[in-house]
Image (cartoon, helix red, strand yellow):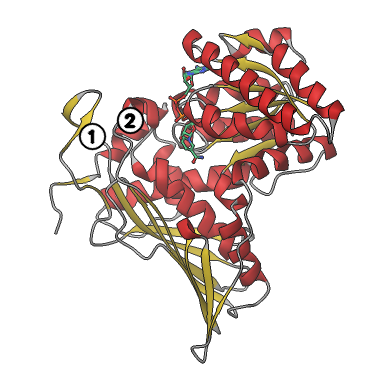
Amino acid sequence: MVKIAAVGTGSIFQRMHLPSYPSVEGAELVALVDVSDQSLKATKKLMLQLYEDKAKELETVDPDRAELLRAAASSIKTYSSLEAALGAEQIDLLDVCTPPKYHEQVVDAIKRGVGVMVEKPMAYSYIEAKRIWDAVKESHAFYQHNEQEIFDPFYYTSRKVVQGGGVGEPLLVSVSFAHYGPENRKWFWDWTVSGGGTLVDMATHSITVGWFLAGFEKRITQVRTVAPHGISQRMSDRLIDGRFRSFEVEDDAHLELRLEGEKGDWVTLLAEGSWSGRDSIPFMVQGTAGVIKGEPENRKLEVVDAFGYEREVAVPKWNSFEMELSNAVSCVKDGTRSISDEDIGLQTTVAMGAAYLSELKGRVAVTPEEFRDFAETFDGGEELVKALIKGVKKGDNS
Ligand SMILES: NC(=O)c1ccc[n+]([C@@H]2O[C@H](COP(=O)([O-])OP(=O)(O)OC[C@H]3O[C@@H](n4cnc5c(N)ncnc54)[C@H](O)[C@@H]3O)[C@@H](O)[C@H]2O)c1
């Protein structure tokens, strides 16, 4: 069994990761780590209930597994720090679900060879993401950039159509992740904790998913923000933490990325991440011989060929978080790398930084090298983020 400690047991862990674990073959959740005692108590209680529900379901078909789940839930340990957990438990894999500011705390564990998976975004800023990346390269510990959308049946099936040659050579990918904002979540609006607004919260999905569809073997070579909204604040104040407040981060992000192949070929990726509703096409892959269109929320996927003939593609049903966790556990057991590794996490972070820099410089195209040169002039992530979000456009919704 792969022994796992969850670090940060708040919303995403309680709602998505914890309910998935009883179904993940080979996973044994042994420790919960959180700075909040309240969160630890609530998570422990939820775990007992979820594991008992699953055990009841399995009682007749797989009594051994049912027993295992009951034993795991009743023996779960709680810790107020990662250090304490690592000192007391034999842990193979950390499941990091803290706010971005605290993702970097895994560096020491990585250096000691402990496997890690970290929720998106990889880290608070490029500076911390690079420290994590350096530690992984040095220790060769397992690393998974947790982007569940690449395990989602809709995007996974779309990639099968692309790779199967269903639309010829892909030329243009459009991906949008949008809602109307996490008003009830204070830290999402606080750049000193989040590292930015909807670009790092929502467009991070669009970038990694779009890249996955175009092919991870391609390199992101240019990024620019695009009209009409670029990286901007569409609303001047919102109901945050109990009252109307102004905020500093963006609530809308539109960018274009150039993904280059080895033969000088490229795919254009249009990525939207929004907390102010959707402005662009939710999903599309345009190839040389057809188009994939779809509605991710409704699991509706269709391919239109060069003659206008439309055919629907069946999208299977499974839980993307369960698949993401299962992927990591299976890789750790087999000693293999994840498809969504530290390179995907870091390059997605670089693309987001380049997008901020593009907006700051007047929506010019920025290369990853230009962004890295810019970022490396700062000693700490907070100064870098502060400089980058100065470019967020305010008060012009034309
Ligand atoms: N994949 C997705 O679709 C998705 C959705 C929401 C959030 N997320 C990501 O998940 C992460 C957590 O988001 P959330 O919504 O669960 O936040 P949250 O605030 O609900 O939970 C975070 C938890 O981390 C704990 N914490 C804070 N500092 C800590 C530390 N130093 N050590 C241990 N625990 C600490 C907090 O007490 C809290 O319980 C973020 O990176 C966020 O971007 C991903």
- The residue depicted at 56 percent of the width and 18 percent of the height is 43
Left or right relative to 255: residue 299: right
Of residue 343 and residue 276, the one placed in the foreground of this image is 276
**Whether the residue under disc 2 has CB within 8 Å of ligand 1:** no
Mark 2 vs 1: CB contact within 8 A: yes
**Label 2 sits on residue:** 191
Amino acid type, label 1: Glu
Of residue 14 and residue 192, the one placed in the foreground of this image is 14
Q: Position of residue 193 (x, y in %)?
A: 38, 26
Amino acid type, label 2: Trp
Q: Position of residue 106 (x, y in %)?
A: 60, 23
Q: Position of residue 180 (x, y in %)?
A: 29, 45
- The residue depicted at 50 percent of the width and 25 percent of the height is 98
Alpha-carbon span between mark 2 and mark 1? 8 Å
- Whether residue 149 is visible, yes or no, is yes
Q: Secondary structure at mark 1?
A: loop
**Label 1 sits on residue:** 248
- The residue depicted at 51 percent of the width and 92 percent of the height is 307
Residue 284 sits above or below residue 382 on the image: below
